[in-house]
Amino acid sequence: MKRKSLLMFCLFLVVAWLSGCATFETEKKAVPYRLTAQGTVIWEDEFEFLPPPPDWKLLRVETGENDINFGFTRSDPGTFPSMTTFAYDEEPFGCSTKFEDREREFFKRFLFNAILQFQVLEKKKVQVLGAEGFEVTVEGKDPIKKEKVRAKVVFGKRGERIVGFYITQWRPIDGTYDLSAFEVFDRFVKSFKLLKKSFYETL
Amino acid sequence: MRKKLFYHEILMFLLLLSLLFLSNAEAKKKVELVGREILNFTLPSTQDRVITYADEYYGKNHLVITFFPAAFTPV
Amino acid sequence: MEGHQRNLYLYERFNARVLGVSRDDVITLKYFANSLDLTFPLLSNVTSFLGVSVDAQVEGRAIFSRRTIIIDKKGIIRYVRDGSPEFKDILLFLKKLNQEGGKP
């Protein structure tokens, strides 16, 4: 009996000590977006945009540097790796606040692990987020794995910093691209609005 | 046999307590660093020159230093 | 390190500078800095004395652990965080430090 009481007391001490360090998650995480009557999505009260059609699934990254904020993905008909993904990224690869330099820095790292031979299809100035932006369309091929990707990257400005939108569409090397997915992406980018200042703009 | 088990349980408990104390000690170490003076260091840099704290930053700028394990690893 | 490079203009605003330090040799660090287009210095602390002085050198290991410290203008350590740098946290701290005028 004495031993049992001592054991219980020891256990109580340990639990009391640990309770200062850890808590049980009792709250459910709130959904980070809401739909408006106009059919747009308001994301974390910070962004507003037109969502893609229902066959696109939401992609969301909780934490981590060099990860997208959120995006959408869709499996396409055909053999692996037929899929299309697009995303918004507050901090695309690179550091420069100038579009041309950022483009060069970005493509050093973009799809680095895929070991692709990139070819620039188009580069042009565009209007994005209500100001001048920069758009680059590329195609990358991997003749070893027999895969290819068509990608479009749009750089815009949020305050002094550059933000990015990108879409990648993967296909087998002899597959055909579906450019209608790129129209969905273009609509997303065109509709994208910043609803408040970023953290960095408030410093 | 019972006595052996009892002492074994006490030993486990003491081990657990000591682990908790250690983790607390690490937190205390971090707090102790705050308020200490930085060493006046001189080290070679990637800008083809040695950098000495006293010459470049002391009295002029606040300084952020990130220590990282190795080049070409995530920092 | 890219995070530091992106925030350089804000560090400048708060009268701060940034350094990266590892136990690599300078040549390796130069290649690393070039790969990330860094314009701030990385320091080579092969003998680890600086890392040891701020407890960033784990006993028995040949490399530093990840740790960020902030030193005010008077050479006093004011901030210590383990793990990858928390850039927003660093910026808020530098803003506060700059407003203080560096008073401990």
Image (cartoon, coloured by chain):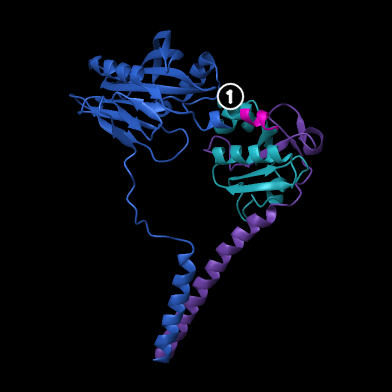
Chain colours: A blue, B purple, C cyan
The residue located at (43%, 15%) in the rendering is: A130
Q: How far across and how far down the image is residue B46, in percent?
A: 68, 29
Q: Is residue C50 magenta?
A: no
User: Which residue of the protein is positioned furthest toward the left in this rendering?
Assistant: A77
Q: Where is residue C36 drawn, in percent x and y? A: 56, 27
The front one of A128 and A110 is A128
C55 or B1, which is in the foreground?
C55
User: Closer to the camera, B5 or C40?
Assistant: C40
Residue A178 visible:
no
Other residues around mark 1 within 10 Å, as few (<14) / some (14–19) / many (≥20): some
Measured from the top left, where is residue A175 in percent x and y?
A: 23, 17
The secondary structure that most of the magenta stretch takes on is helix
Pinpoint the chain carrying mark 1. Answer: C
Quadrant location, the N terminus of chain C: top right
- Under tag 1, what secondary structure? loop
Q: Quadrant of residue A151?
A: top left
**Quarter-wise, where is residue A98 in the image?**
top right
Q: Point out the stretch of residues depicted in magenta.
A: C10-15
Rendering coords of residue C103 (x, y %): 75, 44
Q: How many numbered marks are there?
A: 1
Residue C84 against residue C6 in the figure, above or below: below
